[in-house]
Every structure is written in structure tokens, then in C-alpha cells.
Image (tube, helix red, strand yellow):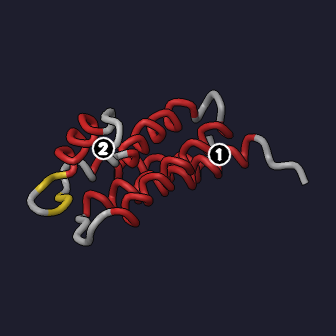
Amino acid sequence: MSTVAVACWQLGGGLYLAAFVLPYGGGTLGYEVFVLGLIYCWLPGAGLPFWWANLLFWYALVAQQKSPRAAAATAVVAAGLGLGWWAMADAGLGPAYWFWAGGMGVAAVGSVAWAAATRPLRP
């Protein structure tokens, strides 16, 4: 894996994990929002499709070595889905959200860098 990709995944993973202990807003911590999302994301019409960005992020992390292009595409979708919450949520998103979404964004950059390094796009 390229140095840039490794650095991006390490930084992205660190930001993602830090989001669990940071405040989300209104006295709620990041891990509490994660657990609530885990419970309610399965309910039809619950309006929490953004939680699924977590599963896509984890898939991208696991698939990085075996299928760099699939991992890159998945990481970009996860980052986009995570940022979608910003557009839908009320004001007052705390640092937990920004670390969570930023971690996925940085990891997506690393995935794209790794995919490009392993098999450059044809002209």
C-alpha cells in the first residue's frame, strides 16, 4: 500500500474512532448516536440511511487489499453518505460528527490514492 494511502487510512481511522468519545451535541456523545443509529437504521421510514455509511466505511477498510478499486468506490460513497447528514440535520452538530465524517473523507482519499497506484486509469 502506498505511503499516502496508509497515512490517510491511519488518520481517517483515528478521526473516526475519536468521534465515539467526542460530544455530538445536546450532551450526547458520539458512541450514543452510533448506538441509536444502529437500533433505528433497520426500521423502514426511520430516516436514518446515513448510519449505513459506517458499514460502507468498514467494508472499504476490509476490502482495501483485495480489491482496491471497489474499496475506493465504497469509501467515496461512505464519505458522501456521511456528509449527507450535514445537509439534513439541524444546526448544532458537534465535533463528533465532524470527526466521523472527516475520518471517512480522509480514508476515501487514501483509498482512491491506493487504487490509482495499484492500477492507473487508462487514457
Q: In the image, 121: left or right of 12?
A: right
Q: Quadrant of the C terminus?
A: bottom right
Residue marked by disc 1 = 114
Q: Is residue 40 left or right of residue 28?
A: right
Q: Kindly state the secondary structure of the residue where label 2 is placed.
A: loop
x and y, in percent, of residue 3 in the image: 59, 49
User: Residue 43 in the image: x percent, y percent?
Assistant: 31, 35
Report whether 15 appears left or right of 24: right
User: Which residue occupies the foreground of this view, 91 or 19?
Assistant: 91
Locate residue 76 relative to residue 41 in the image: left or right. Answer: right
Examine the image and state in which quarter residue 94 appears: bottom left
Instruction: Please report the residue visible at 50 percent of the width from the left and 30 percent of the height from the top.
Output: 62
Give amino acid for label 2: Ala
**Residue farthest toward the front in the current orientation of the protein:** 45
In this view, the residue in front, 108 or 43, is: 43
Other-residue count near label 1 (Cα within 10 Å), few / some / many at <14 / 14–19 / ≥20:
many
Q: Position of residue 68 (x, y in %)?
A: 65, 37
Task: Give the mark nearer the N terminus: 1 vs 2.
Answer: 2
